[in-house]
Image (tube, rainbow, N blue to C red):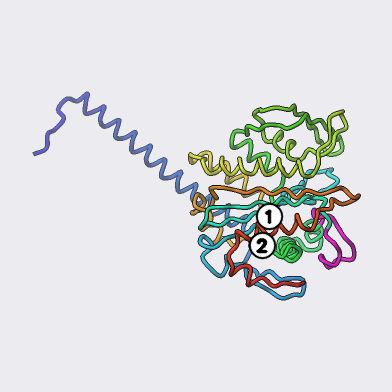
Amino acid sequence: MKKMIKNPRIRKVMTSVLLITGLIVGAASVYAAFLYNKLNQTLDHIAAPEATKASNLNGESFVPVSQATNPIEKPLTFLLTAIDEREGNEGSLNTDVMMLFSINPKTHQGTVVSIPRDLEIEADKSGLDASHKANYFYAYYYNKNRDTALRETKRLFSDVYQVPIDYLAVINFEGFRKLIDQLGGMTVEVDMDMRYQDDSDGTDIHLNKGIQQLNGKQVLDFIRYRKSNLGTAESSDMERNQREQLVLNQLLDQLTTLNGLTAWAGVLDIIGGSIKTDIPADELRTFTKSYRDLKPATVRYIQLKGEWESPYLVVKQQDLEEAIGALRGQQSSEQIDSQIRTD
């Protein structure tokens, strides 16, 4: 026989506690459902409109390995790019940051190769009438046809470097700034004093050497700094690449450890408005569910060093081949064997 709580005061307190607990659980459930819907909306917004096949310069097609098999079991290679869409920016839509990123879920290893923005892509490799810098092509394809720009950019770099690239992601710098702020900033060791101002596009870089907590704008200034008009030393593409890789690694760590429904809601809002990919929505959902498993335990960062021969940065062929070889080492034999070579 159940014992009844006879004390009205205790019974009232217990009823209040149960009511509050019920409200909290109910509110959490409603918010979790809201966040789930927001996640789906975000993934639909940044995903490719439909799954499409990539093609090489000869018009032949190959299907990315992740469309033919379970993407969580097979290695994946991404081309990650960042563009500046601020009004007045003289290089609008040019890719200011470019990285080839391969991950192998089975070995939990990753390899990142930073592509210098001033690296020359010869005319015979691009199929265009003249050579251009690596950061030229996304803007070129976007201005021709914005609906196929991602596919064509990925196709080009797959053929130029003979690496089967599964997917391409583009983030604008304003979204990157907001994302860093949403995550509470980033502790960074600034490697040199940085000063640069440009009234035409609003650039105002003012960073001092040393370890410090940076907000989103300052992190963006840190990775973009190249030249100075206020007395500080200039920065090479190789130094910029090192900064990009440092920030990327820390950003992945912050996203992996991000907790709380409220925090994720803000991140999803920023991602939805700032990133475009050619990844089908169903595969994005698979990646999201397995994010912690996909994140590599170790990442090898490779900088392509070269010499400036105006207007291009020239990289030794051996260094380029070794970097691309490291990327291929992360990929499965099926990916490499299925790649259509044009040489």
Point 49% across, 41% down: residue: 261
- Is 70 left, or right, of 19 in this rendering? right
Image quadrant containing the N terminus: top left
Say which element carries label 1: strand
Point 73% across, 40% down: residue: 223
> What's the CA distance linking mark 2 and mark 1?
8 Å
Task: Indicate the quadrant where residue 243 lies.
Answer: top right
Task: Indicate the quadrant where residue 212 lies.
Answer: top right
Q: Measured along the vertical axis of the image, is residue 162 above or below residue 264?
A: below
Pointer 1: what residue? Answer: 100
Give the camera-side residue of 20 and 229: 229
Pointer 2: what residue? Answer: 165
Q: Amino acid at mark 1?
A: Leu
Q: Earlier in the sequence, mark 2 or mark 1?
A: 1
Does the magenta-highlighted stretch encompass residue 123? yes
Image quadrant containing the C terminus: bottom right
Does the magenta-highlighted stretch encompass residue 82? no
Q: Measured along the vertical axis of the image, is residue 155 above or below residue 276?
A: below
Mark 2 in CB contact with mark 1 (< 8 angstroms): yes
Point 81% across, 43% down: residue: 87
Q: Residue 227, how many percent across, how many down?
A: 84, 37
Q: Residues within 10 Å of mark 2 (few under 14, many from 20)?
A: many
Point 71% across, 71% down: residue: 55
Q: Residue 241, how many percent across, how many down?
A: 73, 44
Segment colored magenta: 121-136
Q: Is residue 312 visible?
A: yes
Q: Residue 278, how many percent across, how many down?
A: 65, 61
